[in-house]
Amino acid sequence: MSDLILQTIVNAVYAASYMSLIAVGLVLIFGVMGVINFAHGELYMAGAYVVVALYAESGMPFLVAVVLGLVFVGLLGLLMEISLFRPLRDNPLGGLIASIGFLLILQTTAVLGFGVRMAHIPPPTQEKIELLNGVVLTHQRLLVIIASVALLSLLYLFLHRTKYGWAMRACAQDREAAALQGISLSQVSRLAMFIGAGLAGVAGALTAPLVSPTPYMGHSVIVTAFIIIIVGGIGQLEGAIVAAILYAFVHTFVTTFFDGVIADITGLLLMLMVLVIKPTGLFGAKDRV
Amino acid sequence: MSRGKVNPWLWVAGIVLLATLIALPFGLSFSQREVAVLLVINVLLVSSYRLMTLTGEWSLGHVVIMGVGAYASALFSKRLGVPVPISMLLGAVTAGAVAALLSFPLFRMKGFYFLIGSFAAGEVIRLIWKYFTNPFGGPKGLKLIPGFPDIGPISFFEPLPYYYLCLIVVGMSLFFLYRIERSRIGLTFHAIHWQDKLAESVGVNTFSYRMLAFVLASTFAGLCGALYVHYIGTINPNRFDVEEMVFVLIWAIVGGTATFYGPILGVVVLTVINEVILRALGFDTARPMIYGFILIASVLFLPNGLESLVPKLQAWRTSRRTAPEGTPASEEKA
């Protein structure tokens, strides 16, 4: 029994790590630009398909494919910012609809390019660590955990130690005040879109061998990401990470000991509870209702 | 022009529209008739959604509420043997009752939080359908749901009679929705949208009016679900997932929600483009992509929706008429 619990904890840590990458990207985009990026799940999917194309079909090294996945999806984000979100800056609902349009385009591109069936990716490594008797952590999952921690630490340093990071946080707090200080909103938005999309892409690329990508895999991811950013408080990066860990643990444990549908219901009820009791999220500011 | 007098051209336009709607299915193929039935139902769905948005709240649970009506009507008729026309009404009432229950947690939130909250509540309902095989049928849903009973020789199994049935039900519902919006209640909804604190300060109970808008909209959405389920004959939880909801949102936004006809314009134009034109051109797998481009183009170039074209068109016609003849075209605005 204790083995099972330990194994579930290991699984939850893995789930928490890639979910926080996705959720932090979404929060960054929402915080800086005020737009809900509905296509975020499809950016994750695009990252996974970069690995399908470069690693599984062309035989590049896995890690190179992952880095290229980050860059490629980051550029997709840049494209979204320049072509959609900038012209629609004063129209958040329009931005939402435009991102749905982009979602359909990405999904169809994946269908046309790779077909609707699950893509098979040979695992880059079969090795695994046996932590205790029977408790297993594969290298692939360990890689996801390490990469997530490293990327999120880098992001933290970037946001707190560099000029651009300060500018970005200033925009998240108050865009107009930031613009009055001479911060270029367009530049910061481009940066936020690149980083936010890139994080979703790298999450997709890293987990691709573990999940078997399909063009429609973004759907469940975006639902999860929404739950996480609500529980953590919209626009709160630290909140998103804590909420991702909380959600991953709750969801993984309920899935293991009950079943998947109950776990989904629990997650949604958790979010509803947070919305009813403290609508700004666990880490949200008080006055933004 | 006095308020009571109606522009005769409006009468002509109305009669032409009605004649077109009645004659329409005869010019269509069988599968297009089926699309027409669903389109008529969707017109009511998106119009009822607009009633909800009058108070300024955008819900992401409207399609699930439609599903509540569909499931309730299907279960009433299939399990309890209630005659279908009555079970349809019961389905609509059930949807309204569920909405009334949901308003207590949901209307503690506003704006974006309400959007996400309504989405979560909807997903919970949908997962309940998925989880409980009895009575909801689990992930596979319900099958062999009784259809609308025959009246004499008319079988409602065919799309043509069902189209007319939907036309009558939806027409009456739209009239009802229109009257609600033009009534004192509708004005209060507008007041809550634009100035909720001010409305409260003059004694409007904003919670109960928000709830009223939500319950009324949900009742009609439930009716849509009932009309849908007794035509299709089978439902499953995935039919009411968030992607379907996104379509309703898109119809409303592409059409524009400032006027009563905006969302209707949106659903009709987009359905015709998606189901008729793109299908005829033979793009099958690429259809969602083209749809995506249309969406992006419409929010970029028509930010106030298709409805914003109507006054422009009127102004253009007026200016064309006044310029050569020099007479004010006052009859254009009735």
Image: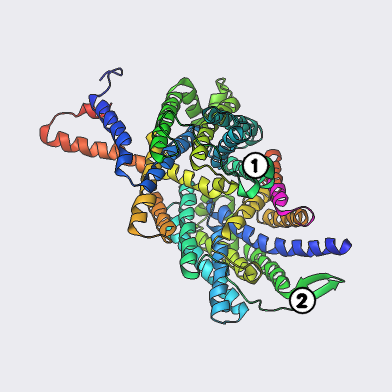
Give the image location of residue A3, x and y in percent: 86, 64
Q: Which residue is mark 1?
A: B136
Q: Which mark is residue A128?
A: 2
Res B258 seen here:
no
Q: Is residue A257 magenta?
A: yes
In-front residue for pair B120/A228: B120
Coloration of the structure image? rainbow
Give the image location of residue A123, x and y in percent: 66, 76
Q: Which residues are magenta?
A: A256-268
Q: Is residue A153 above or below residue B233?
A: below
What amino acid type is highlighted by mark number 2?
A: Lys
Give the image location of residue A273, x and y in percent: 71, 42
Name the secondary structure under disc 2: strand
In-front residue for pair B31/B117: B31
Q: Is residue A67 above or below residue A111?
A: below
Judge the density around disc 1: few (<14), some (14-19), many (≥20) Cα neighbours within 10 Å: many
Dividing the picture into quadrants, the one containing residue A280 is top right
Q: Is residue B271 above or below residue B292?
A: above
Residue at the spot x=62%, y=78% of the render?
A63
In-front residue for pair A229/B286: B286
Give the image location of residue B301, x and y in percent: 36, 50
Dividing the picture into quadrants, the one containing residue B202 is top right
Dividing the picture into quadrants, the one containing residue A150 is bottom right
